[in-house]
Amino acid sequence: MIADTPLAIVVLAAGKGTRMKSDLHKVLHPIAGRAMIDHLLASAAELAPERQVVVVGSGREQLEQALGGRAAIAVQEPQHGTGHAVQQAEAALSGFGGDVLILYGDVPFVRATTMRSMIERLHREDAPAVVVLGFEPEDALQYGRVLAHADGRIAKMVEFKDASDDERACALCNSGLMAVRSADLFGLLARVGNANSQNEYYLVDIVNIATGDGRTCAVVVTDQPDEVAGINSRSELAAAEAQWQAVRRDKAMADGASLRAPETVWFSWDTKLGRDVSIEPNVVFGPGVTVADGAKIRAFSHLEGASVGEACEVGPYARLRPGAVLMRKAKVGNFVEVKAATLGEGAKASHLTYLGDATIGAGANIGAGTITCNYDGYFKHKTVIGERAFIGSNSALIAPVRIGADAIVAAGSAVSRDVGDGELRMVRAEQLVKPGWADRFHDAMKRKKAEGK
């Protein structure tokens, strides 16, 4: 029955997010390099929803651009509570007959398994009108309460501000997440009033209305309360980041990577690590990084949009930017920056080098201080370095330029024309020697200093 029932996702994201004090919409703030709403939608995608609706208020343009058509946009303006927010999705769900899962854009870590359990409960024999996701935090604070029987049937839902002391003593709290059949949802919402301390239309009231009609409503309790934690401030965003990183670090080590100081390594949402990868302290992975088996990422390195091959070595203090590709056993050492460049198998750039828009052949050696001069102020140009080529220290390779296989570029050269296979290219001014000049200079300066000039 569940498999045959289509699913719609409604994500509430109309809050102003004033506590974030940001021009960026709250649900677009990133965790591990990914907007919090995208974390949520990725989990929801595992349930293959037929429709997705995001309810927005201010910041609509930002969300439309970020979502890129992945969800319909419904506007809640002005904001009159959560029940009123869900009502704004009615037009987008016109003609839809299936289950509706109501989520919150600032609650990004809800697991797909939890969402699935709510839908499954909706289809049990007692056919509840509404399924609520409950949780039991260490401190119930000002969460709304779920007053339920031992079998999970809900007797009453109540917001904290409207709860009695006895009701507030209940430890089971309302996460706000619900599963409802589309055939029931908007009819129940139409009956919700705003006679409460906030003069708002509460979504939770659909439970009380359905219960009053003699229908069953049920609660599903998550065994991981942290998954329903909302993010409303910068400090809560930082806490969510720390929570996500702690889980990811444990997973990395469980999958066979070694983290010397786990608490100092920061992953992105899509970081991929092979087995026997070694990661030293204070390494940051931006989005789009793949690290193959046996690679070593040394301390204080930053990688983003890069592919690191088997048994490679990166750092310390290296920066791999988008488009950096290191083939097997390539090495990028301290204070080396690589952007849109490929280092072939066994190629090395060990010190103080910039390699941009370049292809470096297998076994090539790039000396300290070498720069590929790839940008002329208007366009990017490519440098190609052949296999086993040797580039001497402090060389400038002025693109577009090609250095042949087994060629040698002498230290200190500024190369602007192609170098053939096996050639030596030396581009230096002739050295000028003036015997005794330095001694005479020092004597003159010492006299002037003594005379106070």
Image (tube, helix red, strand yellow):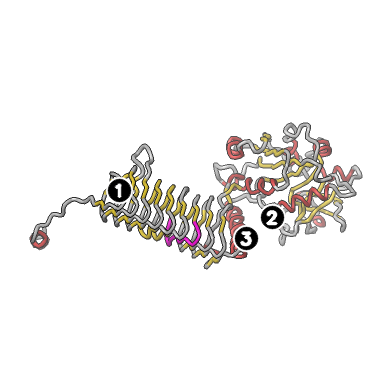
Res. 300 in view: no
Mark on residue 227? 2
Instruction: Please say whether residue 316 is one of the residues in the magenta stretch.
Output: yes
Tag 3: amino acid: Val
As drawn, the residue found furthest toward the bottom would be: 260
User: 286 or 306, which is in the foreground?
Assistant: 306
C-alpha span from label 2 to label 3: 12 Å
Residue under the image location 85 percent in, 42 percent down: 209
Q: Which residue is mark 1?
A: 420
Disc with the residue nearer the chain's start (1 vs 2):
2
Residue 223 picture location, percent across and down:
75, 59
Residue sitting at x 33%, y 40%: 376
Q: Quadrant of residue 453?
A: bottom left
Is 153 in the magenta? no
Count residues near mark 2 (Cα–Cα under 10 Å), then give few for <14, some for 14-19, many for 20+: some
Residue 411 image point, x, y percent: 26, 56
Earlier along the polypeptide chain: callout 1 or callout 3?
Answer: 3
